[in-house]
Image: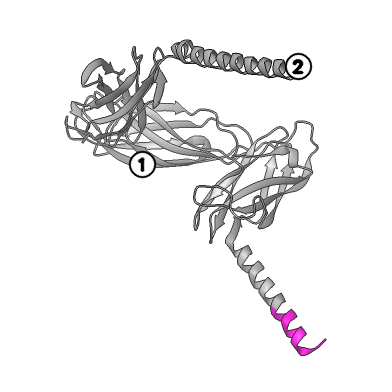
Amino acid sequence: MNIKNGAAIFFSALALILLSSSTIATLGVSPATITFPNMLKGGFSQRAILISTLSDSMIVDLTLGGNIALWINFSENGIAVATNRTKSVYVIVRPPNDIANGNYSGYITVTRRSANASGQITGMGNVVIMSIKVPVNVEITDRQIIGCTAYSFSVDSVEQNNPSKLHVTIRNEGNVRISAFIKIDIWDREQQNIVKFFDFTTQSLLPSIEQQFEFTLPVEDLPLGQYWADISAGECHSSDVVTFDILEKGALSSMGKLIQITNPPWISVGQTAKIDAVFRNEGKKDVTARFKGTISYNGQIVSVLESDAITVPVGQTVSLTTFFKPEQPGRYVIEGKVYYDKKLTFPSSSILNVTESKGAGFSIFTLLYILIAAGSLFFLFAIFRKRRKHKRF
């Protein structure tokens, strides 16, 4: 081998290594190994894996291998990951009821494909650019473990004569279902007297699941002022003391936004259109919201819309639904506002296009097509017979 050929091979190998390194750097998976300790037969557990890319967007596929492949599912698959972003996916394990105690293993293969911004695969079809194998270990035991963590305790300040809300987040750290017992004592401003106390029990939580709970506190009869809430979750060995206020009427601001009015863009005469006014509570207290609007045709109001009233918690988004059944084809304009807490949102609008009913379309157009087709066939048949008659002579 001469020096020239050796240099060419060297630089080709170097380029391949650099290309492979840059490819590997574009896909990241964390953690490198997933472990599920202390799982019961027929139990449940989930862990999150983080998938990231440092270069172009990609589509990620997850496949399973090993003797525990049938135990595992994913919260989603065929995952679109945007450039310089991280995507969280849950790996869910459900061992069978008849499995023996012991340690079991398998693996998840994370494969990457190129994708454009819309999530469509680009380049050479479904060619796999690279893959990463993540080991999965599962321990099966008969020992039941009860444990949980409670945190993010808070109590809402409210206007007088309104109920408050207790918020708490609980995570099941054991391997069996649990329902946590929550106790709350409400003290006066000087923390000398308990003025109210409540007990609550959460819904059942599966192992490894984290959930935020909300409970209504009937404090409508408390006078104005500051209060302290001593909150504890016994099974979770967690507690906290928080403060909240009973405020004068009007002290809390209410603010809402009509995000949009949605409806099917096209329907036929005689069909019923579902119209949703999407409203978000952006204020500091719960509100009762109702959508009111009109439907116009050729500049004339042909229908009045009014939804049921719905209580919308702080930060929540709801759909206020109404229905409309048009009697003639054409272009309809839907306009309206949301009424809440003696306030109005900015108006919004949408368009509804109505065509002839399907039955009417068949009776007119389809019949016309049938007549034209029949005439054409008759004409062609006449020409064919005429040509055959000429051939005989």
What residue would you read off at disc 2? 392
Q: Is residue 10 magenta?
A: yes
- Check the image and name the residue furthest to the right: 1
Question: Mark 1 to mark 2: distance in Å?
Answer: 109 Å
Residue 283 is drawn in which quadrant? top left
- Check the image and name the residue furthest to the front: 393
Q: Quadrant of the C terminus?
A: top right
Res 344 seen here: yes
Which is more toward the observer, 272 or 247?
A: 272
**Relative to residue 128, is residue 225 drawn left or right?**
left
- Residue drawn 27% across and 17% down? 306
Residue 302 is drawn in which quadrant? top left
The number of numbered badges drawn on the structure is: 2
**Relative to residue 215, is residue 17 drawn left or right?**
right
- Disc 1 packing (10 Å; few <14; some 14–19; many ≥20): some
Query: Is residue 11 positioned above or below 149 on the image?
Result: below
Which badge, 1 or 2, is on the more N-terminal residue? 1
Q: State the predominant SS element of the stretch in magenta.
A: helix
**Relative to residue 137, is residue 146 drawn left or right?**
left
Give the amino acid at mark 2: Arg
- Disc 2 packing (10 Å; few <14; some 14–19; many ≥20): few
Badge 1 element? strand
Q: Which mark is residue 241?
A: 1
> What are the residue bounds of the magenta stretch?
1-11
- Residue drawn 36% across and 26% down? 319
Q: Position of residue 19 (x, y in %)?
A: 64, 69
Q: Quadrant of the N terminus?
A: bottom right
Q: Position of residue 356 (x, y in %)?
A: 40, 16
Query: Is residue 152 positioned above or below 271 on the image?
Result: below
Res 141 seen here: no
